[in-house]
Image (cartoon, rainbow, N blue to C red):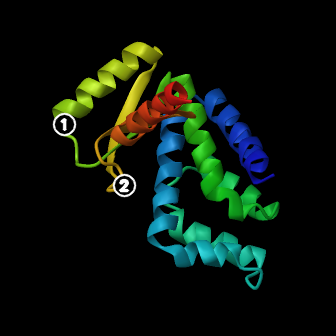
Amino acid sequence: MAELIAKRYADALFEVSQELNKIEPIQNELQFISSCLNDYPEVDLLLKSPLIQLQEKKDILTQVFNQQISKEVMNFLFVLLDKRRQGYIKAIIEEFKVMANAVRNEVEAVAYTAELMTQTDILQLQTKLSATSGKNIKLTNVVNKDIVGGVLIKLGDKVIDGTVKSRLDQMKNQLTQILV
């Protein structure tokens, strides 16, 4: 249900941003809002609180974001407050980001490794993934100590498991099938 709500509101905002030819600026403003909500969780709590009146919430948003975001984004935030959808702001921003990336033929990917990859390795892997997927890949590297070796890639909704553990599991399965 939450995903559907986030998608609908993100779709509406995305449609407006396309009409205004402001996809990039609006996405940047949304990312700014998201980082503010992450950096200052008390603002997020204030917006979600049922004890604070609607007009007070609008005043808080105006004071916090007035000079940093456009009238369109501010009005969108007011609509979310009016419809009591402020709890979905972060999910809506994420959905908007996915839609904007799709228009630019971009996909975000994460490479999980045991150790931090060098910038050269990241660029090489990014180039290979871009060539095989036909999309512009934005690759980030995250260190996961549970990975013994190799790389686990999350590319959109796909997972490419090139870890040592998965290869050993495959060999184990093959050997058990031979012995049985």
* Disc number for residue 83: none
Q: Is residue 76 left or right of residue 171?
A: right
Residue 22 visible in the displayed image? no
* Front label number (1 vs 2): 2
Q: Name the one closer to the observer, 8 or 24.
A: 8
Residue 11 against residue 83 in the figure, above or below:
above
Residue 134 image position (x, y, % from top left): 46, 14
Looking at the rendered structure, the secondary structure element under dot 1 is: helix
Measured from the top left, where is residue 59 in percent x and y? Answer: 64, 73
Residue 148 to residue 167: above or below: below
Residue at position x 77%, y 42% from top? 8
Q: Amino acid at mark 1?
A: Gln
- Name the spot of residue 163 as percent of width and height, x first: 36, 38
Q: Earlier in the sequence, mark 1 or mark 2?
A: 1
Q: Tell me the crowding category of disc 2: few under 14, some 14 to 19, or many 20 or more residues within 10 angstroms, Cα based.
A: few
Is residue 82 found left or right of 49 in the rendered image?
right
- Residue 119's disc number: 1
Identified at 48% across, 51% down, the residue is 31
Query: Residue 79: x percent and y percent?
Result: 76, 56
Question: Which residue appears at 54% of the width and 28% of the height?
Answer: 177
- Quarter-of-image position of residue 131: top left
Residue annotated with mark 2 = 146
Vertical placement of residue 65 versus 23, above or below: below
